[in-house]
Amino acid sequence: MKALEEKADPAIKVTLMAGGTERCLGKYFAPLVLHRIGKWVILAIYAVLIGLFVYGATQVRVHFEIDFFISKTSVIYTYF
């Protein structure tokens, strides 16, 4: 193994020294993302998430009362 590492191309050396996560990303995830179908799948997931976020943002309701900030026993409360 040592002899192979000495003769290897620098890119292969980096791959051999990479951790498990880097090898998984390079071997499985990168080809998936770079493939045409993978790009469309990721784009579809992104579009669905944006749609869900927009829907969620439209469902937010603001409930504001002055009682949340000023006590009823305060002098300022009588002005509101």
Image (cartoon, helix red, strand yellow):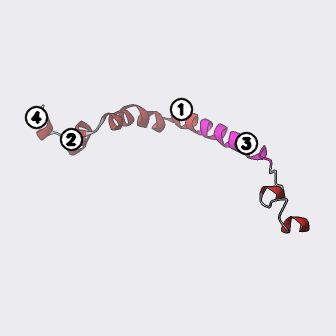
Calculate the distance from the C-alpha at mark 3 to the C-alpha at mark 4: 56 Å
Residue 65 belongs to magenta span? no
* In this rendering, the label closer to the viewer, 4 or 1: 4
Left or right, 79 with respect to 11, comes to: right
**Residue 27 placement (x, y as % from top left):** 36, 32
Calculate the distance from the C-alpha at mark 4 to the C-alpha at mark 1: 39 Å
Calculate the distance from the C-alpha at mark 2 to the C-alpha at mark 1: 31 Å
Calculate the distance from the C-alpha at mark 3 to the C-alpha at mark 1: 29 Å
SS class of the residue under badge 1? Answer: helix
Q: Is residue 70 above or below residue 62?
A: below
Q: Is residue 78 above or below residue 60?
A: below
For residue 13, which numbered disc appears in the image? 2
Residue 58 belongs to magenta span? yes
* In this rendering, the label closer to the viewer, 3 or 2: 3
Calculate the distance from the C-alpha at mark 2 to the C-alpha at mark 4: 11 Å
User: Looking at the image, do the residues carrying marks 4 and 1 touch, with CB atoms under 8 Å apart?
Assistant: no
For residue 37, which numbered disc appears in the image? 1
- What residue is rendered at 81% in x and 59% in y? 71
**Residue 24 placement (x, y as % from top left):** 36, 32
Q: Which residue is mark 3?
A: 56
Magenta extent = 43-61
Q: Quadrant of residue 55?
A: top right
Left or right, 66 with respect to 34, comes to: right
Q: Which residue is mark 4?
A: 2
Left or right, 52 with respect to 38, comes to: right
Name the one closer to the observer, 29 or 57: 57
SS class of the residue under badge 3? Answer: helix
